[in-house]
Image: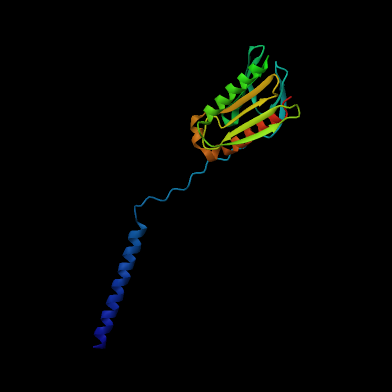
Amino acid sequence: MKMKTMSKSVHHLCSLLILLCISIFVSSCSSDAPTPRRYAYPRVDTYPQKYSSIVNSADVNIEVNTAARIVADSVADADTRWITLSYPKYKANLYITVNKCNSKSQLQDVIANRVQRISLNTGGKDFEQVDLQSEADFQSKIFTIRGGSTNPVMFISSNQRNCVVSGSLYFLDSNAVAKVDSIAPIIDAVSNDIIHLAKHLR
């Protein structure tokens, strides 16, 4: 009687062991795809903050990052100059316009035009604004958009007498705009360049 009970227990134990081995084997041969690793965008190595001066036809001194190359510099007339700075590593251009105004009303018209353009470029997105004044009395407003924009940094500066300097950063790669975290260091770096530019306008 005891022998039969022991035999049943051993048989039951063996069955459990076999089932356990089968389940381990099946789970190890599962066809489930492995969980993909999170993709990290490469960190952008930003340019050093070193600057040199550009003196334009309106006799305004503009300091720009030495890593930025002037790829276009044109004069529409005696009072207007367009400068395009290329940031090769960022795949972006900084477009700068310098207007020399002959009257107070022309100055106000140019400022109103630039403000309207900046308003359109923000497209209702949230932005950060920095206001500052240079030692030569240029008053500047710098706008930074964090939520993804082809024009994430814009500025307008004026001495309120006869000169307006304005500009905007533009990403040449439209796909970069969607990578908000990836381009954040670039936006910060160019914002710092523009803050330096605004502080040293004269």
Q: Measured from the top left, where is residue 177 in percent x and y?
A: 51, 34
Q: Measured from the top left, where is residue 181 in percent x and y?
A: 54, 40
Q: Is residue 34 left or right of residue 118?
A: left
Regarding residue 66, the answer to whether it shows in the image is: no
Closer to us: 65 or 194 = 194
Q: Quadrant of the N terminus?
A: bottom left
Q: Residue furthest right?
A: 135
Task: Quadrant for residue 2, please give it.
Answer: bottom left
Q: Is residue 179 left or right of residue 156?
A: left
Q: Quadrant of the C terminus?
A: top right
Tell me the residue at 67%/29% (across/down).
140
Q: Residue furthest bottom?
A: 1
Colour pattern of the rendering: rainbow
Tell me the residue at 33%/67% (across/down).
20
Q: Is residue 68 left or right of residue 16?
A: right
Task: Quadrant for residue 137, please give it.
Answer: top right
With respect to residue 130, does 98 lie above or below?
above
With respect to residue 71, does 126 lie above or below?
below
Q: Is residue 90 left or right of residue 23?
A: right
Q: Measured from the top left, where is residue 148 in percent x and y?
A: 51, 35
The total of numbered circles placed on residues is: 0
With respect to residue 52, does 24 lie above or below?
below
Regarding residue 1, the answer to whether it shows in the image is: yes
Q: Residue furthest front?
A: 105
Q: Measured from the top left, where is residue 102 in percent x and y?
A: 68, 14
